[in-house]
Image (cartoon, rainbow, N blue to C red):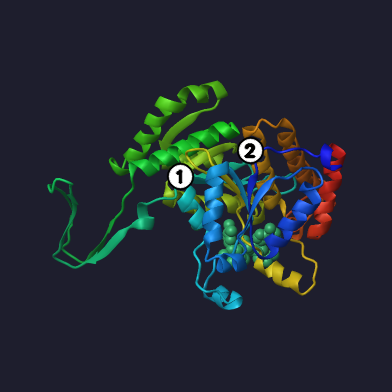
Amino acid sequence: MSENTKIQMKTPLVEMDGDEMTRILWRMIKDTLLLPYVDLKTEYYDLGLENRDKTDDRVTVESAEATKKYGVAVKCATITPNAARVEEYGLKEMWKSPNGTIRAKIGGTVFRTPILVKGITPFVPAWTKPITIARHAYGDVYMNAEMRVPAGAKAELVVTKADGTEERRTIHDFETPGIIQGIHNVDKSISDFARSCFNYALDTCQDLWFATKDTISKTYDHRFKDIFQEIYDAEYREKFEDAGIEYFYTLIDDAVARVMRSEGGFIWACKNYDGDVMSDMVSTAYGSLSMMTSVLVSPEGVYEYEAAHGTVQRHYYKYLKGEKTSTNPIATILAWTGALKKRGELDALPDLVLFAETLEKATIRTVEDGVMTGDLAGMSTLPNVRRADSEEFLLAIKERLDAAL
Ligand code: NAP
Ligand code: MG
């Protein structure tokens, strides 16, 4: 396509580049599947570890601020430094996780969705559609205060109010030694979580499930249930009815049983701990870490798209030795298409939306035609599987994209 027949954009995407093998794939995806077709407008932030170190990590904060300004970002996987990385890159400091920094700035909830393709069967065969897990990422056991308690001690909950008065509850009179734990959450964070979930359900036109243990936790978990219900009734019920989707609350035990029997195709909102554990279970059951997308959605409707996997370090070291690698670019491609589609919707650019959808279909189609990277080739039940390296795989997608356009 010539410059003037390329698909035009209005508002730039915030582009957050990253590290290692995914940084290599990032470039290849742009060169092969995006730049020839789209007059790509991005505001580029290099979140590669070297540049984070050079800028004292200001680049990460700036990229998050730009995301709040423009509304949509696409992010490459990045290294979260540990001691070994400090040594490897000669870092000034052990910089914090970029995802953590971005999440703290933007707020909101992470939605993780498996990418389903024919030939790769989930371990739960009934799951023919994706299950998206939304994990509340604030408080509970992740910000607890806990103690061991000696025999003969009395443990109490004490709340000292602003006016100095106290409210107390006995936790336990310890005749023998034991343990206690104090956890908290705040209405504001739970409300933000609820709104992010309702918005994302409307966006993706899927039912929303929410479950806690409110029969046992009659104040704490019940508060989650009530906040969701109040916000739903006041702000979302009509919109859900118009979209033909459903919100329902159920006890977590019942939810687990229903999830196992379901065919998928819904969003499962989870409290912090439930989301931590259930997302590992659900993603494993769908087959592969390389086939999971992730989007951070703020209650104000800011979106940051990425792959759920990391920088695929082992493949990168092979690449550096000059070896061809068969690293799966699908989740990164779908992060781009997710972001382009959202940008297209917000800016009323149907061509951009259509391009993103066509690229997504071409990507899935390539795998379903039997051409795939090594991670999938090992799992596919298709009869004629061809294991492609990353470059060959992207070219195979391009062929199908060209045919479809
Ligand atoms: P990883 O990059 O997710 O890779 C773990 C293993 O999973 C790989 O060695 C590979 O297995 C397989 N794998 C993951 N993605 C794949 C893909 N696209 N194609 C093919 N195989 C894939 O996790 P890691 O090696 O533990 O972490 C590497 C770096 O990523 C760390 O520095 C970590 O901080 C960072 N990280 C970043 C994010 C993020 O930015 N969102 C998330 C997680 C981790 P084989 O080697 O067996 O082929
Ligand atoms: Mg976990």
277 up-or-down from 117: above or below = below
- Residue where numbered disc 1 is placed: 270
Residue 75, given in percent of the width and then of the height, sits at 62, 53
Q: Secondary structure at mark 2?
A: helix
Dot 2 or dot 1: first in sequence order is 1
Q: Nearer the viewer, residue 192 or 288?
A: 192
Is residue 296 in sight in this rendering?
no
Q: Secondary structure at mark 1?
A: strand
Q: Which numbered tag is attached to residue 342?
A: 2
> Mark 2 against mark 1, which lies toward the viewer?
2
Q: Could you give the CA–CA distance between mark 2 and mark 1, rounded to whole angstroms? A: 24 Å
Q: Nearer the viewer, residue 290 or 97?
A: 97
Q: Nearer the viewer, residue 98 or 225?
A: 98
Residue 341, given in percent of the width and then of the height, sits at 67, 38
Q: Quadrant of the N terminus?
A: top right
Is residue 118 in sight in this rendering?
yes
Indicate left or right for 164 with 270 as reference.
Answer: left
